[in-house]
Amino acid sequence: EYATVTGGTDNRALADAATVTGGVAGAALGYASSVSGGYDNTAATKRSNVVGGISNYVGGYAATVSGGHSNSVYAPYSVVSGGDSNRVAGYAHTIVGGVSNTIVTDSYSYIGGGSGNEISDGSYASIVGGVANEVSATYASVGGGGYNVASGSAATTSGGVYNEGA
């Protein structure tokens, strides 16, 4: 009921209050979900949103992907803002951009960008950027650089290459 498709081609709004505005092959499948433009984007859960981009998927309640390519969010209240092949699972995480960054942990973690960075355990963890950095503990962080690890609770590795804080 009250689903809306406005323009574009091959778009589908298949749930109550779902909306697709322009674009090609967009799908708003959850209650009050929306897809705004782009190509082959899917907002699959309640109140989920995709704003532009190509082949983005949102499967978390009230989560958003804003542009980019092949980004996926499976965590409620989470955001991916562009980039390529970024993935979020858990609860209330943010990836600002970059390529192939992943957050698959409990809650409230952040990756600012870069490539191949991963937060794999704990909550309130962060990676500001860089390449192939890993955080695997609550309150741990990596500031940047490459191939750095923060594996202990509240550990910090500020940057450089091949450093570890445990």
Image (cartoon, rainbow, N blue to C red):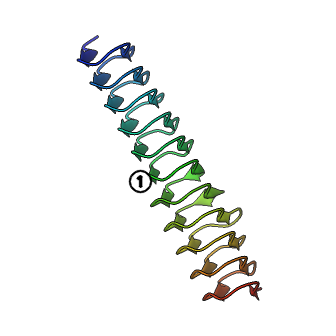
Name the spot of residue 104 as percent of width and height, x first: 66, 54
Q: Look at mark 1 in the image and give the residue it sits on.
A: 81
Rendered residue at 76%/84% (across/down):
162
Closer to the camera in the image, 63 or 55: 55
Q: Is residue 158 left or right of residue 11?
A: right
Q: Is residue 163 above or below residue 140?
A: below
Name the spot of residue 121 as percent of width and height, x first: 71, 64
Name the spot of residue 165 as percent of width and height, x first: 74, 87
Q: Amino acid at mark 1?
A: Ser
Question: At numbered mark 1, what does the secondary structure look like: helix, strand or loop?
Answer: loop
Q: Quadrant of the C terminus?
A: bottom right
| Label 1 Cα crowd, 10 Å radius (few <14 / some 14-19 / many 20+) | many
Q: Is residue 115 above or below residue 30?
A: below
Q: Quadrant of the N terminus?
A: top left
Q: Is residue 76 left or right of residue 135?
A: left
Rendered residue at 48%/53% (across/down):
83
Name the spot of residue 74 as percent of width and height, x first: 57, 41
Rendered residue at 23%/17% (across/down):
7
